[in-house]
Image (cartoon, rainbow, N blue to C red):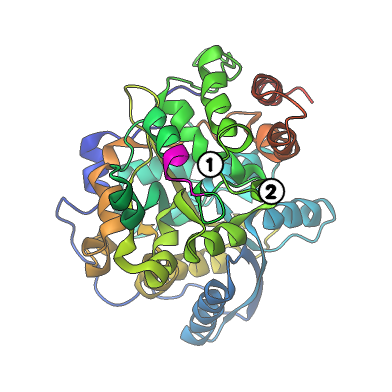
Amino acid sequence: MPDDTGVASRRTALKTLGLAAAAMVPGRGFAQAPAVRKKVSLAFWTWSDNPSHQKMLVDSVDAFNKSQSFITVALDAGSRTMEVQQKVLVAFAAGAAPDIAGAVQTHIQDYFNAGILWPIDPLFQKWDQKADYFPNILAFMRSKPEQPILYMPQRILPYILYYRADWFDAAGLKPPATYDAFIAAARQITKPGEHAGYAMRGVDYYAVQPIEPIWGSAGVQFVTADGKVDFADPTAVTVTEKWIGMFTKDKSAQASAISDGYPQLFSLMERGGAAMWIYGTHANPQLNAALGDRIQGVPTPNAGQTPRMLANPEGDFITTSCKEKEAAFEFLQFMGSADPVGMLAISRGYLPVRKSLSNDPRIQGNRFFKIATDHADTWWTPPFSWQNWANYQNKIAPYWQQALRQEITPKQWNEQAAALLRGEG
């Protein structure tokens, strides 16, 4: 059963950030001498957030293909995160799954439960660089303590609150540390016709993901240690009411929130359409390029006494239908090595998950990374491994839009979410 143990201990978290000494592995990459000595073709499906990200993936896969003469990887990276999951599920059912797929931590247990993910544990345990992964990352790689190593994460994404420092200074406001201060600041800093207080997302499951650590900080466990779903309790409903109220009552969220997703919110922030946005550190290169010092960051505001910072690992896994698993594992090794991680993680605003990459100057000198690393003892994930988490994640989005349209109340939304977490519906 899941419990409220998603927070990394301070000692473990500090080690994760490379604040403890870690020996560098020699060379630009980490892969051992290739074990595969025959011609192999592999299909790799993953997502890309934008054309720049897609080019990084193309370049990384091309570099792998050119690094040896036996394995050729064909990349499909034209979809979004949730679209990749659906593509893989449908293709697997049809007997046409890829050999390798990209995944976020939210999907790992579901893939494993569905028989799609092949645990890499047999190959990982023989790998001479397995000790380069931090203990808390290894825990994520298992998803549950009793399970084998399931996949190869390459990066981890902490979520922070971005805010327009120039507007806050002009209004005489401090960046909010508590949830109530955040709601009040959004209301106060809104200027109708000019900018909203908060850039709210209305599309897909990721519309509610930024609120998860706020629910968690209020003491909501989603699913308790004995399997009870507490997501419709008054505490959870109160958090939801305040969030939805930014759109329905305070008018401190943008008018287009119901239909806005990732691209629209990036554009909104870049053009000065909103004062605050909770999102991953991977937003910082683009926001910093557009706004410079006007954009700053603080930890996600808390609704209780226990701070929470959402931090999601991402990486790649081998499917059970892959016929050349050793070749696929060589590709996973390569994608977790220095150059691909530098390109696909650090330069995109993610933190690496390997000791030997954690002291990169690009990490140490980035103010947004510093926020995440200074509060790493609060890194947290909801119970992604819960047996009905995928049921909730995959089905909750339409109800969220109904709540924003006031077709259902926030309480009814939480009740529906709780039902999905119980496996109902």
Q: Nearer the viewer, residue 150 or 5?
A: 5
Q: Is residue 43 visible?
A: yes
- The amino acid type of the residue labelled 2 equals Ile
Q: Nearer the viewer, residue 47 or 265?
A: 265
**Marks 2/1: CA distance?**
43 Å
Q: Which residue is mark 1?
A: 252
User: Mark 2 Cα within 10 Å, few/some/many (few <14, many 20+)?
Assistant: many
**Which callout, 2 or 1, points at the residue further toward the start of the chain?**
2
Judge depth for marks 2 and 1 and give the one in front.
1
**Where does residue 358 sit, x and y in percent of width and height?**
26, 60
Q: Is residue 187 magenta?
A: yes
Q: Secondary structure at mark 2?
A: loop
Relative to residue 62, is residue 97 drawn left or right? right
Q: Which residue is mark 2?
A: 116
- Residue range highlighted in magenta: 186-191
Q: Is residue 30 visible?
A: no
Q: Is disc 2 in contact with disc 1, using a CB cutoff of under 8 Å?
A: no
Relative to residue 319, is residue 70 drawn left or right? left
**Where does residue 2 sit, x and y in percent of width and height?**
50, 24
**Where does residue 184 sit, x and y in percent of width and height?**
42, 33
**Where does residue 344 sit, x and y in percent of width and height?**
45, 69
Q: Nearer the viewer, residue 284 or 45?
A: 284
Majority SS type along the magenta span: helix
Q: Quadrant of residue 132?
A: bottom left
Q: Is residue 204 magenta?
A: no
Residue sitting at 65 percent across and 60 percent down?
Answer: 80
Residue sitting at 68 percent across and 58 percent down?
Answer: 84
Q: Secondary structure at mark 1?
A: loop
